[in-house]
Image: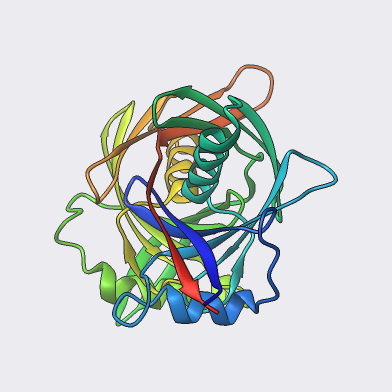
Amino acid sequence: MRATSFTKVVGSGNDFILLDQRTQPVSLNPAQFAKMWCDRKQGIGADGLLLLLPSHKADARMRIFNPDGSEAEMCGNGLRCLAWYLHTQERRKALSVETRAGLMQTQIIGPGRVRTYMSRPKELRLGLTLRHSGKRYQVHAVNTGVPHAILLVSHLERTDLPTLGPAIRFHRSFRPAGSNVDLVRIDSPHRISIRTYERGVEAETLACGTGAVASAVIGTALGKLKPPVQVMTAGGDCLTVGFHQTRKPWEELYLEGPAQVLFEGGIPR
């Protein structure tokens, strides 16, 4: 029986099904594949589907599909996982990857540790006031490849993200695409803790790379953080967000953290 080969990869608790379409170009509907196989009860289980494809602009091209079948422009942890997978296959330490959010540069800096250089943040909006269930929330928004809405909180664990996340994710201020939602506690000028409700997953995840970057950018814009910023994720891993603030804000913006290949398998066609 013929099978579609896949690789399970994980970066800071964000897990993905990776299909290397360079070696096994198969005709599939990636949205349907993601909805079926990202399911944690009836599929393989993952936060998303990564497609590794050839590129005319870079060393490789990445597409990412959420468990609900929607396609995302970018995923920081997914990009690190894809770069580490490519390193295990080709032993190259520096790679360029084409994404829907632009060309990204990746660098292997140690065993299972990857740095990705991100696109410059855009659509920065500070001090938005949103209302939900009779309460007012101050939200800060930025796009770090995908849109993020940031709330600074004092009590990270006690905040009801499962309820607040969807309310902000679908708020009219972020229509039509919606937004990821990040709760951020500032622990020091160089350290934050974060929880993320991810658009497309429609649930809290153990980590979010673009969310870590967005949180560091917002904290810096508010004058509360200075790079490099250590980002403690819900899964317990620490991500590093670095950048320069000399000539232009957020110059050479990067995300650094762990990535690993978990296992390989095959799905009957």
Residue 30, placed above or below residue 191: below
> Whole-percent x and y of residue 246?
62, 17
Display colour scheme: rainbow
Above or below, 143 relative to 160:
above
Quadrant occupied by the C terminus: bottom right
| Figure quadrant of residue 206 | bottom left
Question: Measured from the top left, where is residue 156 in percent x and y?
Answer: 20, 53
**In the visual, does 194 lie left or right of 268?**
left
> Which residue is painted at 51% across and 74% down in the image?
34
Residue toward you, 151 or 206: 206
Q: Residue at x 73, y 38 (%)?
A: 59
In the displayed structure, does residue 257 sit left or right of residue 121? left
- Residue lying at the far front of the rendered structure: 1
Percent across and percent down for residue 237 are: 27, 40
Of residue 90 and residue 202, the one placed in the foreground of this image is: 90
Most extreme residue toward the right is 56
Kindly tell me whether residue 78 is visible in this rendering: yes
Which residue in the rendered view is the most extreme toward the left? Answer: 158
The tally of labels here is 0
> Toward which corner of the image does residue 232 lie, by quadrant?
top left
Q: Is residue 223 visible?
A: no
Residue 169, quarter of picture = bottom left
Residue located 49% across and 80% down the image: 35
- On the image, the x and y values in percent for residue 187 come to 23, 35
